Amino acid sequence: MISANNITLRVGKKALFEDVNIKFTEGNCYGLIGANGAGKSTFLKILSGQLEPTKGDVAITPGQRLSFLQQDHFKYDAYTVLDTVIMGNARLYEIMKEKEAIYAKEDFTDEDGIRASELEAEFAEMNGWEAESDAATLLNGLGVDTEFHYTLMADLNGSLKVKVLLAQALFGNPDILLLDEPTNHLDLPAIEWLEEFLINFNNTVIVVSHDRYFLNKVCTHTADIDYGKIQLYAGNYDFWYESSQLLIKQMKEANKKKEEKIKELQEFISRFSANASKSKQATSRKRALEKIQLDEMRPSSRKYPYIDFRPNREIGNEVLMVENLSKTIDGVKVLDNISFTLGREDKVAFVGSNELAVTTFFRILMGELEPDEGNYKWGVTTTQAYFPKDNTKEFDNDLTITDWLTQYSEIKDATYVRGFLGRMLFPGEDGVKRVRVLSGGEKVRCLLSKMMISGANILILDEPTNHLDMESITALNNGLIKFPGVILFTSHDHQFVQTTANRIMEILPNGTLIDKITTYDEYLASDEMAKKRHVYQVSESDAEDN
């Protein structure tokens, strides 16, 4: 068990946490949620001892070991992959290295023998002889092939490093496991493996994630950070959302009844306080009035943008025809003879590991790249709005947010444009901020404003959920579900894909296309998808070799 006792953390004059008391018990997985800036990662750092609170303390059951997901991807560059994983259990790794040093001595003394014997006993007690095989099992489960196990961390790419650091956190059956955004940069098989691992993990887990599907799958409890306090709910993310909305509704209804009662009492007192025969009743009602307390309806620190894509023109029957499209990038054929036709009600999710192929395809459709072979044709009634994965060029200027968005609006009116910005959580004073200095999430909200103001009836979105908090992802998700036009998109957010798409396309590593009229969950469960997963993992290994 791990508990936070009267935790307060002040940053300057601002209190990020104020007298937080919470216990995390064995056998449960807690999803730590909250708006961007609420302090989720900071709270994990306090629990792990990486950050000292201003007041209060963290208590861990004596003898229990805590492990957390390292965020520094370069910290272990001088070590092999296997050593890095085993270092997740610091004491076990320390014993291994001390043993090696003793046995490497040329002048082995009696004292060395005694010490070696003590270390061997402790090593055996910690299942040290199984350490390498246990580490290898974790690595293989996450998709780090055996050929990399003795490679230096410095020689791995970013996605493999993330998997190794995750294996390090999971290694040795820690009593308390803290995970900050563990699914970031993981491929689908690795995420599925991690979900099963955590579902079967019997100790305490506290996880921060923007992936709603992941939280729903693994969490038994939800810890909600809002205004420096943490409220604990039994249940996963969806249960928390429904419960919190129901609580707000009940409080509003209760307050409405109390306000009606207050009004009734006030009217009686006003009418009869000067009437001698009614004075006792008026006094009684005054006492009753004093006892009525309205429930405090403190607004949440969460802010949901208002995302609503409204096409200026209804789309016709002819939407998009793609015929025999091929493209080679840096000597690799990323698109190989792609053909399909879109219907007016299609919402297409591009899934799988071949992200370069999807980005290339979207750029061809938007006229930014030319195909090597084949062609495509948009219907005459269509208009397109595009969300690029790399938005660097969009914001490489000194325009203010208002001026930046105005250039894409048919109506060149500042008030009209600010209305769109306001919906996307940019208040009036933010309109004069330079787009060059915006955060990743702010840039995404600007691009979504641009797409809304365009009035397009076809939306093309390349990883729009990157950099967004859960509130913004939820708002975008809802906006796309009710959008009456056609959508082509890609996202790593499982729930986002499942609830938005009615058609799934996967461009395989060899550049060919799988095209299915189905939901995402049905596609993942299909026999064809199961056969492709091997290709998915092999393609990653091939990329490493290249």
Image (spheres, rainbow, N blue to C red):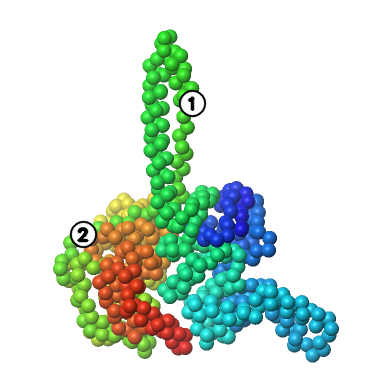
Q: In the orientation shown, which residue stands out farthest toward the top?
A: 276
Q: What's the mark number on residue 290? A: 1
x 45%, y 88%: residue: 546
Q: Label 1: state its secondary structure.
A: helix
Q: Badge 2: few (under 14), some or many (20 or more) residues near its Cα, within 10 Å?
A: few
Amino acid carrying label 2: it is Asn
What percent of the width, then of the height, locates residue 12? Answer: 60, 52
What percent of the width, then of the height, locates residue 38? Answer: 51, 55
In-front residue for pair 444/428: 444
Amino acid carrying label 1: it is Glu
In-front residue for pair 80/405: 80
What quarter of the picture does the N terminus occupy?
bottom right
Taking 137 as reference, is 527 left or right? Answer: left
What percent of the width, then of the height, locates residue 274? Answer: 42, 12
x 31%, y 58%: residue: 479
Total marks in image: 2
Q: Which residue is mark 2?
A: 312
